[in-house]
Each structure stands twice: as structure tokens, then as C-alpha cells.
């Protein structure tokens, strides 16, 4: 089986390769193709993967591409994790929003709309290329904002598109642990996860283990609620009031003042921090291993590519959502949450279920098709799905609770206005998307920040 990764020079590609190396079953991926417009980044990632494959006799063959049309023919699955504008673009998204007194978060805030407006035209070109060169391939989307991009791709490629995110499975895993359930993996057939919403806007409403819903037990225990990340982010009193555990990204909605103030106090935005960190990693690794005159500070030439990547990854995970944790009272992430096993495991489970006839229950992003009465059939939602050789289909779900309905409907309206702006070039639709976003508290500010984004990003000059 052939897997092609778009954004193959991305920092998280080794996570996917690690999952492939651990898969020795029939129908496994035997060839991994990496496509990226940046050959230098491709070369660095290839060094890391070579270290990982050392001593593994059946490691998937690796091929590198800088032309999409050459990477696609014959591929069975396509995994997309591109970032239009790079981390420097993310840093600008966040910085510009903060200059206007807004939360700039890259997917749910004003920055997320800017990011989507830059990304949609690019993924539409990718979708057309896939339709031409790999019409039978399945497309697994991790490119953010994942719900928006998945909906756009589905409009071109149909039912062979599925969006994934590691937040829901991470939330369920932490809740399972906090509820005292030991020895059962969250992806086990004996575990049923009742999770509903949109990407980065969902709630865990039930967690059934061998027929028993353990979530009420967790909600009744203040100490247990204070033992895991989301419990500390939202507080026991709010989780109990909801009767559900929110996705971590809902912290921006429920604690807007605190999140904004924490962003203001932070020495740098998350995007700027990662831009510097990864620039150092890529530059340092290239110099250390390619005979550069002076390796980057802190990057000894004797270190393996894999070790450098692992150290950088650990720092990345330890500082994830740092400002939100500061807003909630400052706490460190649990050691278990620094381990891999998120989106790469979900992607592998999708591929094995579809290609090998296995059955998997996963929380995915696919069209609503009547699951939520408040949204139309084509609206992409994030909810439990059944995956097998017949494809991906949503499992039956209870109706949206009152606390979720308004946020979900509003967020989908923002997504749709963003998509319309990208498809038609309508500045008015982009303006409407920003003004409707709950994290943008003024129509006047919405217009000002849009003008600022258009002025800064040449990729947004198509908006008229």
C-alpha cells in the first residue's frame, strides 16, 4: 500500500512514520511518499526517518517529491498536513489579532479565519490534482482549520475525504484515566465515546466502558476532575454545570477575558515561539549533518537527527496551550499527555479499516447527513464514526444539548461565510465571518483586523 503525505517536510511527519514502522500486518504501507514545496525541509525530515528506520528490515520505502503531480499517481491514501504561510504566517495571524485587542488563535479566533482564507484556494488546487492523478485514493485531512478544509475538499472529492484531529481522543483518554479505568485503551472495541460538535468545538457527553458509562462517576468526584488537563482548564464547577467535559479549545470561548489577558502577558505568541523553535531545528540539523560551517547554537553535530527531533518535540508538547494553562492558574502537562498516539494512530486505524476490512470506531470530521437537526446535510461535524471496508459513516447520536446548540450553529455560520469568501473572493463574506465570530467583540474591529490581514498577506489580496 502507498501513502502520500502532503506537507511531507512538516515537523510531525515522524509521528506518522513511527506508526507505520510498528505496523507489521498484511496490507501495511510499504511505500511512503513525502511531498513538500521546500526541498530543504524534506531533506531534514528524511534524515529523521532514516534514523527511525535503522535496524527495521521491513521499513516502508521512502520517496521524496517537490512536484505534486509526480507524487500522486498510484497512491492509495493521501494524508494532508500543509501550512500555507508556514509558522511565520501563524505568528502574524496571532500578532495582528492581538494588536486589535483580540484572541488570535490559529483555528478558532480571528487568526483561524485568516489562515482558512489563505489555505482554501491552495487545497482546492490540491483537490483538483487528486481528482486528476489519484481519483481512487482516500484523502485524510489534518490541515487546519480541519472542519473547514474537510468541508471544502469534500465538495470536490466526495465521500472519500475524512478529517481527523487528535483533540477528542486525547480528551477521552485523559477522562478514562481520571475515572480510574486501568488497562483499557480508549480505542478498544469495549469503549464507546459519546462526543459531539465541530472541530475544536465539541463536548464529551459519555464514556462507556464494557457497558457502563463512567463519566457520571468522574463528574461526581471533584478530586478526579482536578487531576487532568481539561478538568483544571475549565474547573469542576463548570464541568458539573454542563454535565459534560469540553474540548480544550472551548477554553477560548468560556474564558475569553482570562485567555486574552494571558496572551497579553505572554512574552511571545505560540506561533512565534514555534517559528523560532522549528527554524532552529531545521537549520541546525541541516548544518550539523551537511557539513555547515557552524552548527546552530545548542545543536552538536554528534547528535542523531532522531534525537534532535525528539528533544524538540518534547519541548513543543510541554509548552502546548501554555497561555491557557497560565490563565487557569498555571499547571504543567501530565507526562502521559506528552506521548504520541494521537492523530497518527487515528490515520493508521482509518487506513487499516478501509483497506483490510477491519472495523474501527473513531471520532472524525465528515458531512452531517442528518445527524444534527440544526445543520444541513453537507455541514462537516466532528462525531463518532464507524469505519470499515465500506467507508466512513456517522454513528447515531443524541441531539445537541442546549449548552452546545448556539455555539455550534454560530461556528458553522462563521465557517460557511469563510468558505464563501474564499470561493467567491468576497471581502464582504470575510468581513461577515470575522464579525460573527464570538471571539471578535466588535464589528468595527472585525473590519479593521480584516484590512490588516489583507494588507499583510499577499495571499489575501484576492478578496474584493
Image: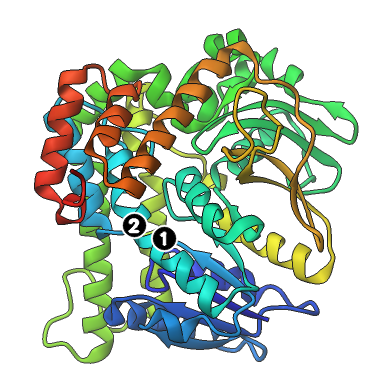
Judging depth in this view, the residue of 309 and 88 nearest the camera is 88
Residue shown at the point (27%, 81%) measured from the top left: 40
Q: Is residue 181 above or below residue 362?
A: above
How busy is the neighbourhood of tag 1: few (under 14 within 10 Å), some, or many (20 plus)?
some
Q: Within the image, what quadrant is residue 432 found in?
A: top left
Q: Secondary structure at mark 1?
A: helix
Judging depth in this view, the residue of 41 and 435 nearest the camera is 435
As drawn, is 132 to the left or to the right of 316?
right
Judging depth in this view, the residue of 357 and 69 nearest the camera is 69
Residue shown at the point (59%, 8%) measured from the top left: 241
**Label for residue 52?**
none
As drawn, is 229 to the left or to the right of 437?
right
Report the quarter where the N terminus lies.
bottom right
Visual colour scheme: rainbow
Residue 329 at x, y percent in the picture:
36, 21
Q: Is residue 59 above or below residue 419?
A: below
Residue shown at the point (22%, 66%) measured from the top left: 280
Residue 298 at x, y percent in the picture:
21, 69
**Total numbered badges shown on the rendered structure:** 2
**Label for residue 124?**
1
Q: Within the image, what quadrant is residue 240 found in?
A: top right
Residue 189 at x, y percent in the picture:
84, 47
Report the quarter where the C terminus lies.
top left
Residue 14 appears in the rendering: yes
Residue shown at the point (75%, 23%) measured from the top left: 398
Q: Looking at the image, do the residues carrying marks 2 and 1 touch, with CB atoms under 8 Å apart?
A: yes
Judging depth in this view, the residue of 380 and 40 nearest the camera is 380
**Label for residue 121?**
2
Q: Secondary structure at mark 2?
A: helix
Amino acid at each position: 500500500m502507498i501513502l502520500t503525505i502532503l506537507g511531507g517536510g512538516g515537523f510531525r511527519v515522524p509521528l506518522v512514520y513511527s506508526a507505520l514502522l510498528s505496523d507489521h500486518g498484511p496490507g501495511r504501507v510499504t511505500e511512503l511518499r513525502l511531498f513538500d514545496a521546500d526541498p530543504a525541509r524534506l531533506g531534514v525530515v528524511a534524515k529523521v526517518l532514516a534514523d527511525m528506520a535503522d535496524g527495521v528490515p521491513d521499513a516502508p520505502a521512502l520517496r521524496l517529491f517537490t512536484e505534486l503531480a509526480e507524487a500522486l499517481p498510484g497512491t492509495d491514501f493521501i494524508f494532508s498536513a500543509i501550512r500555507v504561510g508556514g509558522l511565520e504566517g501563524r505568528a502574524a495571524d496571532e500578532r495582528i489579532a492581538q494588536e486589535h485587542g483580540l484572541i488570535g488563535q490559529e483555528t478558532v479566533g480571528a487568526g483561524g479565519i485568516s489562515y482558512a482564507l489563505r489555505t482554501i484556494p491552495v487545497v482546492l488546487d490540491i483537490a483538483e490534482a487528486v481528482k486528476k492523478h489519484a481519483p481512487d485514493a482516500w484523502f485524510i485531512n489534518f490541515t487546519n482549520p480541519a472542519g473547514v478544509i474537510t468541508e471544502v475538499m469534500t465538495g470536490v472529492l466526495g465521500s472519500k475525504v475524512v478529517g481527523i484531529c487528535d483533540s477528542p481522543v486525547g480528551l477521552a483518554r485523559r477522562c478514562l484515566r481520571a475515572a480510574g479505568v486501568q488497562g483499557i485503551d480508549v480505542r478498544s472495541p469495549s469503549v464507546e465515546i459519546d462526543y459531539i460538535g465541530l472541530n475544536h468545538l465539541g463536548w464529551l457527553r459519555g464514556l462507556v466502558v464494557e457497558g457502563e458509562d463512567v463519566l457520571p462517576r468522574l463528574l461526581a468526584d471533584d478530586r478526579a476532575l482536578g487531576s487532568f488537563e481539561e478538568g483544571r482548564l475549565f474547573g469542576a464547577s463548570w464541568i458539573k454545570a454542563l454535565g459534560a467535559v469540553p474540548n480544550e479549545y472551548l477554553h477560548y470561548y468560556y474564558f475569553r477575558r482570562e485567555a486574552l489577558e494571558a496572551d497579553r502577558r505572554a512574552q511571545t505568541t505560540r506561533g512565534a515561539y514555534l517559528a523560532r523553535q522549528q527554524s532552529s531545528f531545521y537549520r541546525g540539523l541541516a548544518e550539523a549533518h551537511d557539513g555547515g560551517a557552524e552548527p546552530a547554537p545548542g545543536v552538536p553535530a554528534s547528535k542523531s537527527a532522531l534525537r534532535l527531533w525528539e528533544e524538540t518535540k518534547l519541548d513543543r508538547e510541554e509548552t502546548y496551550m501554555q497561555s491557557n494553562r497560565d490563565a487557569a492558574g498555571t499547571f504543567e502537562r501530565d507526562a502521559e499527555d506528552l506521548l504520541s498516539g494521537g492523530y497518527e494512530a487515528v490515520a493508521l486505524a482509518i487506513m487499516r479499516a478501509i483497506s483490510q476490512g477491519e472495523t474501527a470506531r473513531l471520532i472524525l470530521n465528515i458531512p452531517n447527513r442528518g445527524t444534527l437537526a440544526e445543520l444541513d446535510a453537507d455541514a462537516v461535524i466532528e462525531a463518532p464514526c464507524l469505519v470499515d471496508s465500506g467507508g466512513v459513516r456517522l454513528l447515531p447520536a443524541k441531539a445537541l444539548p442546549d449548552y452546545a446548540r448556539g455555539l455550534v450553529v454560530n461556528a458553522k455560520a462563521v465557517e460557511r461565510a469563510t468558505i464563501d469568501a474564499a470561493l467567491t473572493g468576497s471581502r464582504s463574506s470575510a468581513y461577515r465571518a470575522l464579525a460573527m465570530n464570538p471571539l471578535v467583540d466588535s464589528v468595527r474591529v472585525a473590519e479593521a483586523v480584516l484590512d490588516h490581514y489583507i494588507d499583510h498577506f499577499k495571499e489575501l489580496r484576492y478578496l474584493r
